[in-house]
Amino acid sequence: NAGVTQTPKFRILKIGQSMTLQCAQDMNHNYMYWYRQDPGMGLKLIYYSVGAGITDKGEVPNGYNVSRSTTEDFPLRLELAAPSQTSVYFCASSFGTGLGEQYFGPGTRLTVT
Amino acid sequence: AQKITQTQPGMFVQEKEAVTLDCTYDTSDQSYGLFWYKQPSSGEMIFLIYQGSYDEQNATEGRYSLNFQKARKSANLVISASQLGDSAMYFCAMREGPAGGTSYGKLTFGQGTILTVHP
Protein backbone atom coordinates (compact mmCIF):
# COMPACT_ATOMS: atom_id res chain seq x y z
CA ASN A 1 0.00 0.00 0.00
CA ALA A 2 1.26 3.46 -0.91
CA GLY A 3 -1.01 4.99 1.77
CA VAL A 4 -1.77 8.66 1.11
CA THR A 5 0.14 10.26 -1.75
CA GLN A 6 0.33 13.93 -2.63
CA THR A 7 1.67 15.75 -5.66
CA PRO A 8 3.53 17.96 -6.16
CA LYS A 9 5.96 18.05 -3.22
CA PHE A 10 6.88 21.68 -3.83
CA ARG A 11 5.41 24.47 -5.92
CA ILE A 12 5.97 28.17 -6.40
CA LEU A 13 3.02 30.17 -7.71
CA LYS A 14 2.71 33.76 -8.75
CA ILE A 15 -0.07 35.84 -7.27
CA GLY A 16 -3.29 35.27 -9.20
CA GLN A 17 -2.30 31.89 -10.63
CA SER A 18 -4.33 28.76 -10.00
CA MET A 19 -3.33 25.18 -9.32
CA THR A 20 -4.62 21.84 -8.14
CA LEU A 21 -2.99 19.86 -5.36
CA GLN A 22 -3.50 16.17 -5.91
CA CYS A 23 -4.24 13.63 -3.18
CA ALA A 24 -4.90 9.93 -3.48
CA GLN A 25 -5.26 7.07 -1.01
CA ASP A 26 -5.35 3.33 -1.60
CA MET A 27 -6.69 2.22 1.78
CA ASN A 28 -10.37 2.42 0.79
CA HIS A 29 -10.95 5.11 3.41
CA ASN A 30 -14.23 6.91 3.07
CA TYR A 31 -13.19 10.05 4.96
CA MET A 32 -10.62 12.46 3.51
CA TYR A 33 -9.35 15.83 4.68
CA TRP A 34 -7.26 18.79 3.60
CA TYR A 35 -5.27 20.78 6.15
CA ARG A 36 -2.87 23.67 5.94
CA GLN A 37 0.03 24.24 8.30
CA ASP A 38 1.49 27.71 8.56
CA PRO A 39 5.04 28.08 9.90
CA GLY A 40 5.32 27.16 13.59
CA MET A 41 1.60 26.48 13.83
CA GLY A 42 -0.76 23.57 14.10
CA LEU A 43 -2.88 22.21 11.28
CA LYS A 44 -6.13 23.85 10.28
CA LEU A 45 -8.88 22.05 8.38
CA ILE A 46 -9.71 23.45 4.95
CA TYR A 47 -12.22 20.96 3.55
CA TYR A 48 -13.26 17.41 4.20
CA SER A 49 -15.21 14.66 2.47
CA VAL A 50 -17.13 11.72 3.87
CA GLY A 51 -17.49 9.90 0.57
CA ALA A 52 -17.54 10.28 -3.18
CA GLY A 53 -19.66 13.28 -4.13
CA ILE A 54 -19.88 14.61 -0.54
CA THR A 55 -17.69 17.49 0.62
CA ASP A 56 -17.97 20.20 3.24
CA LYS A 57 -16.08 23.22 4.51
CA GLY A 58 -13.69 23.17 7.42
CA GLU A 59 -12.31 26.02 9.46
CA VAL A 60 -10.46 27.92 6.69
CA PRO A 61 -12.12 27.20 3.29
CA ASN A 62 -11.87 30.64 1.66
CA GLY A 63 -9.84 30.63 -1.53
CA TYR A 64 -10.08 26.87 -2.01
CA ASN A 65 -12.35 24.35 -3.68
CA VAL A 66 -12.53 20.59 -3.60
CA SER A 67 -14.22 17.76 -5.41
CA ARG A 68 -14.44 14.04 -4.77
CA SER A 69 -15.53 11.99 -7.72
CA THR A 70 -13.96 8.73 -6.51
CA THR A 71 -13.19 7.15 -3.13
CA GLU A 72 -9.48 7.34 -3.87
CA ASP A 73 -8.96 10.94 -5.00
CA PHE A 74 -9.53 14.26 -3.28
CA PRO A 75 -7.96 17.19 -5.17
CA LEU A 76 -7.71 20.69 -3.70
CA ARG A 77 -8.04 23.62 -6.08
CA LEU A 78 -6.53 27.03 -5.38
CA GLU A 79 -8.04 29.81 -7.43
CA LEU A 80 -6.33 33.22 -7.69
CA ALA A 81 -3.44 32.38 -5.40
CA ALA A 82 -2.55 34.94 -2.71
CA PRO A 83 0.56 35.25 -0.50
CA SER A 84 -1.61 34.30 2.49
CA GLN A 85 -1.93 30.83 0.94
CA THR A 86 1.78 30.20 1.34
CA SER A 87 1.75 27.13 3.57
CA VAL A 88 2.31 23.39 3.76
CA TYR A 89 -0.75 21.45 2.69
CA PHE A 90 -1.52 18.02 4.07
CA CYS A 91 -4.07 15.54 2.84
CA ALA A 92 -5.28 12.86 5.24
CA SER A 93 -7.72 9.98 5.25
CA SER A 94 -9.42 7.74 7.78
CA PHE A 95 -12.01 5.04 8.15
CA GLY A 96 -15.39 6.34 9.14
CA THR A 97 -15.45 4.06 12.16
CA GLY A 98 -12.93 2.79 14.69
CA LEU A 99 -10.64 5.17 16.55
CA GLY A 100 -10.64 7.56 13.64
CA GLU A 101 -6.92 8.12 13.49
CA GLN A 102 -6.00 9.96 10.35
CA TYR A 103 -3.27 8.87 7.97
CA PHE A 104 -1.40 11.76 6.42
CA GLY A 105 0.30 12.30 3.12
CA PRO A 106 3.82 13.76 2.96
CA GLY A 107 2.59 17.31 2.34
CA THR A 108 2.94 19.90 -0.42
CA ARG A 109 4.99 23.02 0.30
CA LEU A 110 3.44 25.93 -1.58
CA THR A 111 4.92 29.40 -1.91
CA VAL A 112 2.94 32.24 -3.46
CA THR A 113 5.02 35.27 -4.50
CA ALA B 1 -11.45 29.95 23.48
CA GLN B 2 -8.92 27.58 22.00
CA LYS B 3 -10.09 24.02 21.89
CA ILE B 4 -6.60 22.55 22.22
CA THR B 5 -3.85 24.31 24.15
CA GLN B 6 -0.23 23.25 24.23
CA THR B 7 1.52 25.70 26.53
CA GLN B 8 5.09 24.53 25.98
CA PRO B 9 6.51 25.92 22.73
CA GLY B 10 9.75 24.01 23.34
CA MET B 11 10.98 21.29 25.66
CA PHE B 12 14.43 19.83 26.25
CA VAL B 13 15.21 16.42 27.67
CA GLN B 14 18.32 14.37 28.21
CA GLU B 15 18.59 11.12 26.33
CA LYS B 16 17.14 8.17 28.30
CA GLU B 17 15.12 10.48 30.55
CA ALA B 18 11.32 10.72 30.54
CA VAL B 19 9.49 13.84 29.37
CA THR B 20 5.90 15.05 29.62
CA LEU B 21 4.30 17.21 26.95
CA ASP B 22 1.24 19.10 28.12
CA CYS B 23 -2.13 19.33 26.40
CA THR B 24 -5.38 20.76 27.68
CA TYR B 25 -8.63 20.74 25.78
CA ASP B 26 -12.02 22.36 25.84
CA THR B 27 -15.22 20.66 24.77
CA SER B 28 -18.79 20.34 25.93
CA ASP B 29 -19.17 16.92 24.32
CA GLN B 30 -19.23 13.87 26.57
CA SER B 31 -17.83 11.64 23.85
CA TYR B 32 -14.60 12.70 22.19
CA GLY B 33 -11.18 11.42 21.25
CA LEU B 34 -7.70 12.74 21.87
CA PHE B 35 -4.74 12.06 19.59
CA TRP B 36 -1.03 12.76 19.61
CA TYR B 37 0.96 13.10 16.41
CA LYS B 38 4.69 13.45 15.86
CA GLN B 39 6.13 15.62 13.09
CA PRO B 40 9.87 15.10 12.53
CA SER B 41 11.94 17.66 10.68
CA SER B 42 11.18 15.77 7.46
CA GLY B 43 7.61 17.02 7.79
CA GLU B 44 5.40 13.94 7.79
CA MET B 45 2.69 13.47 10.42
CA ILE B 46 2.94 10.24 12.41
CA PHE B 47 0.09 9.00 14.61
CA LEU B 48 1.36 8.03 18.08
CA ILE B 49 -1.46 7.35 20.49
CA TYR B 50 -5.21 7.69 21.06
CA GLN B 51 -7.41 8.13 24.13
CA GLY B 52 -11.18 7.95 24.05
CA SER B 53 -13.14 9.99 26.56
CA TYR B 54 -14.82 6.87 27.95
CA ASP B 55 -11.63 4.82 28.16
CA GLU B 56 -11.01 4.00 31.80
CA GLN B 57 -7.36 3.16 31.38
CA ASN B 58 -4.69 5.56 30.19
CA ALA B 59 -3.55 4.65 26.70
CA THR B 60 -0.07 3.24 26.19
CA GLU B 61 1.87 2.45 23.02
CA GLY B 62 5.41 1.28 23.63
CA ARG B 63 7.36 4.18 25.13
CA TYR B 64 4.38 6.53 24.76
CA SER B 65 1.66 6.88 27.33
CA LEU B 66 -1.15 9.34 27.68
CA ASN B 67 -1.85 10.79 31.11
CA PHE B 68 -5.60 11.43 30.79
CA GLN B 69 -7.19 13.53 33.51
CA LYS B 70 -10.77 14.04 32.41
CA ALA B 71 -11.86 16.38 35.20
CA ARG B 72 -8.93 18.68 34.45
CA LYS B 73 -9.44 18.27 30.69
CA SER B 74 -5.82 17.38 30.18
CA ALA B 75 -4.23 14.72 27.99
CA ASN B 76 -0.49 14.89 28.51
CA LEU B 77 1.89 12.75 26.46
CA VAL B 78 4.62 10.98 28.40
CA ILE B 79 7.64 9.69 26.51
CA SER B 80 9.79 7.34 28.54
CA ALA B 81 13.48 6.65 27.91
CA SER B 82 13.86 9.45 25.35
CA GLN B 83 15.88 8.76 22.24
CA LEU B 84 17.61 11.16 19.87
CA GLY B 85 15.06 10.20 17.23
CA ASP B 86 12.28 11.57 19.43
CA SER B 87 13.40 15.11 18.59
CA ALA B 88 10.43 16.49 16.67
CA MET B 89 7.32 18.64 16.86
CA TYR B 90 4.46 17.00 18.77
CA PHE B 91 0.81 17.87 18.22
CA CYS B 92 -2.17 17.16 20.41
CA ALA B 93 -5.50 16.93 18.56
CA MET B 94 -9.13 16.35 19.46
CA ARG B 95 -12.13 14.83 17.72
CA GLU B 96 -15.36 16.15 19.21
CA GLY B 97 -18.17 13.64 19.26
CA PRO B 98 -18.02 9.85 19.03
CA ALA B 99 -16.01 7.98 16.42
CA GLY B 100 -18.23 7.33 13.44
CA GLY B 101 -20.55 10.16 14.45
CA THR B 102 -21.47 13.40 12.75
CA SER B 103 -18.17 15.05 13.58
CA TYR B 104 -16.92 12.95 10.66
CA GLY B 105 -13.58 12.48 12.35
CA LYS B 106 -12.58 16.12 12.01
CA LEU B 107 -9.60 16.99 14.20
CA THR B 108 -8.66 20.25 15.91
CA PHE B 109 -4.94 20.59 16.49
CA GLY B 110 -2.93 22.46 19.07
CA GLN B 111 0.02 24.63 18.09
CA GLY B 112 2.56 21.98 18.93
CA THR B 113 5.58 21.52 21.18
CA ILE B 114 9.09 21.17 19.79
CA LEU B 115 10.96 18.49 21.70
CA THR B 116 14.74 18.40 21.59
CA VAL B 117 16.55 15.38 22.98
CA HIS B 118 20.14 16.03 24.07
CA PRO B 119 22.74 13.23 24.05
Image (cartoon, rainbow, N blue to C red):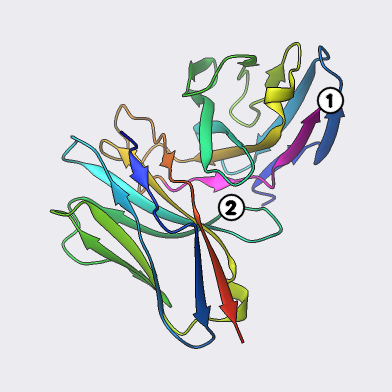
Amino acid type, label 2:
Met
- B83, A66: nearer the viewer: B83
Distance from disc 2 to disc 1, alpha carbons, whole Å, reads 27 Å
Locate residue B79: give its quadrant.
Answer: bottom left
Amino acid type, label 1:
Thr
Residue A32 visible? no
Is B29 displayed left or right of A35 in the figure? left
Magenta residues, start to end:
A101-113
Locate residue B20: give its quadrant.
Answer: bottom left
Question: Mark 2 sits on what residue?
Answer: B45
What secondary structure is marked by label 1? loop
Q: Residues within 10 Å of mark 1 (few under 14, many from 20)?
A: some
Mark 1 belongs to which subunit? A
- A69, A20: nearer the viewer: A20
Question: Mark 1 sits on what residue?
Answer: A113
Going 51% across and 34% down the picture, which residue do you hit?
Answer: A44
What secondary structure is marked by label 2? loop
Image x and y of residue B9, in percent? 49, 57
